[in-house]
Amino acid sequence: MPREIPVGNGDLLINFDEFYRVRDIYYPCVGRYNHTGGHVQRFGVWADGELFWIEHPGWKRELRYREGTLVTAVKLTHDALGLELTCEDAVDFHEPVLLRKIKVRDLKGAQRDVRLFFHIDFSIKESPVGDTADFDPETAGLVLYKDDSYFLVNTSVGERTAVDHWSIGTKRVGGAEGTWRDAEDGVLGRNAISQGSVDATIGVNMTVPGKGEQTAMMWLACGDSYERVRELNWVIKSKGFDKLMSRTDAYWRLWARKDRSDRHVLPDTVRELFVRSQLILRTQIDNRGAIIAATDSDISHFAGDHYAYCWPRDGALVAQALILTYQSELSRSFFRYCARVIHKNGYFLHKYTPEGHMGSSWHPWTMQGRTVLPIQQDETALVVWALRQHFEVFKDVEFIKPLYNALVAQPAIWMMSYIDSNGLPRPSWDLWEERRGVHTFTVAATIGALTAAAAFARDFGDTERAEAIDAAAERMREAMLKHLWNPETNCFARMATPIEDVATSPATRAGAGVGQLAAQPQAGGGDTNSTTFPSAWKGESPHVKGYRLDMTRDSANYALFAFGALRAGNPMVTAEMDSLFKRLWVKTPIGGCARYERDYYHMVERENTEAVPGNPWVICTLWHAQHKIALAKTLEELRTAMPMLEWAAEHARDSGVLAEQYHPYTGEMISVSPLTWSHATVVTTVVQYLRRHQQLVDEANMPAGFEEAGVA
């Protein structure tokens, strides 16, 4: 189920689902811990003797944000109940507090006794064992706690600050459904405490005048002690609820205005998605530096794991978007995080927790009795490349200095050592984390990284190292053209497998998706023929100078121009991108571009794969827009990229949230939402569009003879 409206501040993240129910509460790190375990936190409205939970089909819902900020603007209407609710939700920009303001309006023309019910179904630190919930007489709220995790829930109506009535009890033990059942008669039992697998429900009483309105406030304060959440409760009362909401609104409006590009050339829908994407991706970034792939916990039901990890690759590409929008504090924080987690030998492993520990993995340390590195080399390469992008913009020498050895010198040494006799990187796992071999994406990313490392070395006076790195990059570029380009098809291979590897071991696959989550999370599992010999490939795989090539069309080959391995206008790159678009565009009314031919992850179409090679992905669609932007020599050519940005805007939810991928026939969201990478790709593509637009305008306005005079 989509996560429709995330709100957060880098310490506390709250995800609401499409019914406007809280589903995920992450604290004290974005991505860890999820104190709901993904369980529904119910919200209900009682009036005239009837209670309707918010998922009831009688509710009409509009789930959006206020423009340009991370405060929600939710409208709920129930005709039979005769009530309209206008809701605002925000996590305070500074304190770990969720603020909820709910304005209830009568539609029947009579004074109403209305009661709001909030259900709290926590599994603190992701387990219900040992939880406690109690009524706190000092604050007149409820406190739920375990170990060093404390949560205080309280409400306010008018001058009254207190929970009017509450129920504390047992859930999912001995057949108990939970205290939300106690709310259905409109009255809660007020028991003082319970421990173990507990939940709680609080009630707020309101008198709503006919055709008038009444407002209730509710908040959730998070801390590491009983005293801390009591202090936060006092902060809310003393500063004033509306003031906290107002300052948070103002903060995010200011935050989203760092990039001063002239956006008037964008269609309204694309301009709105650009701003919204910046704000949404910020909710998925932990204040300690980890950039989390996604925090939609429903995916754990699919494969027993989630996306709430930091992949260095995803993080580097998100950092690119942050750099382009001048969010330097966040990009610095990410690179410092990377310096903490990188292996001493100069490479990154698969993925990491928000706190910097090694994450779960399906990449083995041994294959066919041989020790292998369980890595995706592009993850190491792209961090180095992105660090150079950061430095080119901000020139912050003092920041780079302590990171130089860990994130430049040592990775460069390792990348130059992890090369085969032809000058290509040795086999590693691919961008999508499904195949082990020598991948065009990895090669292009590594060339970009080596070029970046050489530039750093020259800047720091390390000229001999710079020359050695440059030589390695150039040799790798030549090897890429020699071994990965197939002149018979006029395309680059997706992957090359050294002949000796083919001879000594069968192709293997550790099933994965998004480049993130294993569909079959076991090493060496799955269809043993689908990696080196994909079902989309007919006949024998071509042999090119010691490698067997996999010519499956794969969107990841956009990397050829994206990281500087080749120019966007190189005829080989143009031929490759044309081939990818022709083969991977989804030929249904939904459109969009698939990852690769016969993409099995969340596969919908299994028969007509010529028309539907896979589900459309936001990132793959926008990679084509980026290529068109890079090629554009006129404003007319540049505008050919805009339909792809409009495609992304059309497939966003009303709130602006984008998923990982979409159903090729219905357009429904598939897999996680929001996906941080999707939103970052929107941001990157829009900035590239705006900058190229300005360049073309400037060139058109340049006086005749200006360039010839050598001034340009």
Image (cartoon, rainbow, N blue to C red):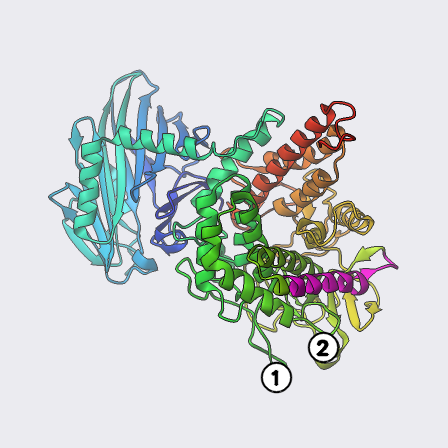
Could you tell me if residue 670 is visible in this image?
no
Q: Compare residues 635 and 521 and report the one nearer the observer.
A: 635
Work out whether 348 lies above or below 396.
below
Residue plotted at (76% across, 32% down): 637
Residue plotted at (83% across, 60% down): 486
Q: Position of residue 44 (x, y in %)?
A: 32, 37
The residue carrying mark 2 is 501
Dot 2: element: helix
Could you tell me if residue 475 is visible in this image?
yes
Amino acid on which disc 1 is placed? Gly
Distance in Å between CA atoms under marks 2 and 1: 13 Å
Q: Is residue 440 left or right of residue 5?
A: right
Quadrant of the snapshot with the C terminus? top right
The furthest residue to the right: 488
Q: Quadrant of residue 462?
A: bottom right
Mark 2 surroundings: few (<14), some (14-19) or many (≥20) residues within 10 A? some
Q: Which region is colored magenta?
A: 466-489
Residue plotted at (38% across, 43% down): 8
The residue carrying mark 1 is 369
Amino acid on which disc 2 is placed? Asp
Residue plotted at (41% across, 54% down): 31
- Membership of 412 in magenta stretch: no
User: Which label's residue is closer to the chain start, 2 or 1?
Assistant: 1
Q: Position of residue 586 (x, y in %)?
A: 72, 45
Q: Position of residue 301 (x, y in %)?
A: 48, 58
Kindly identify which numbered label has been placed on residue 630. Answer: none
